Amino acid sequence: MTQAEPTQNQTSTEASNLTEQFMQALQTTEQTGDVEPLVALFAEESSLKNLTTQTWTGQDGAREFWTAYLSNFDSIRSEFTHHLEASGTGVMEWEATGQLKGGAGLAYQGVSIIEIDAGKVSAFRTYYDSAAFVNTGMAEVRSE
């Protein structure tokens, strides 16, 4: 994997591939609360999965997923430590820090994978340290 450049200093024109565009869009979404820049990267037939048993589909599913993600936090910021895009797959290693609703501090790490088809995200999967949520009294980030 390659070391990620500090994405907060990049503009959208500097992202050289969809994985980097995704990282930038996620950070923008976390800062502004507007999920649409992130949703725009997803294909109509895309799927999204996290540690729950639910699967979200399409751009409407992406909108629901990311809106629910944000609703778990008073603030959240993902910093990417490594990323790689090759053969239609993007891999991102990250650490997120912030505050859960109600004010409990939180820091957790994970890996997210995107599958890319025709320049859009066709699948998104994320795997993270759910113990961080247990320690704060929240079993997992839910989107229900």
Image (tube, rainbow, N blue to C red):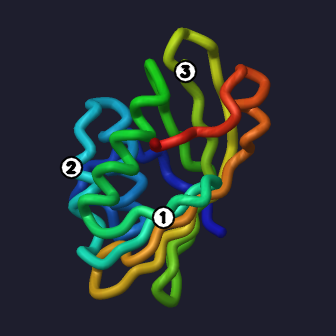
- Tell me if residue 24 comes above or below residue 17 in the rendering: above
Residue at x 61% of width, y 48% of height: 94
Residue drawn at (54%, 55%), measured in percent from left and top?
Answer: 4
- Dot 2, crowdedness within 10 Å: few (<14), some or many (≥20)? some
Mark with earlier residue (2, 3): 2
Q: Nearer the viewer, mark 2 or mark 1?
A: 1
CB atoms of marks 2 and 3 within 8 Å: no
* Residue indicated by mark 3: 100
Q: Separation of disc 2 and disc 3 at Cα?
A: 22 Å
Residue at position x 61%, y 53% in the image: 52
* Spot occupied by residue 10 in the image (x, y as percentages of width and height): 33, 48
Dot 2 amino acid type: Glu
Which comes sooner in the sequence, label 2 or label 1? 2
Pick the front one: 101 or 27: 101
User: Which one is nearer the viewer's eye here, 81 or 74?
Assistant: 74
Name the residue carrying label 1.
Answer: 55
Residue 2 sits above or below residue 45 on the image: above
Instruction: Tell me the SS state at disc 1.
Output: strand
Q: In the image, 87: left or right of 38?
A: right
Q: Amino acid at mark 3?
A: Leu
What residue does disc 2 label?
36
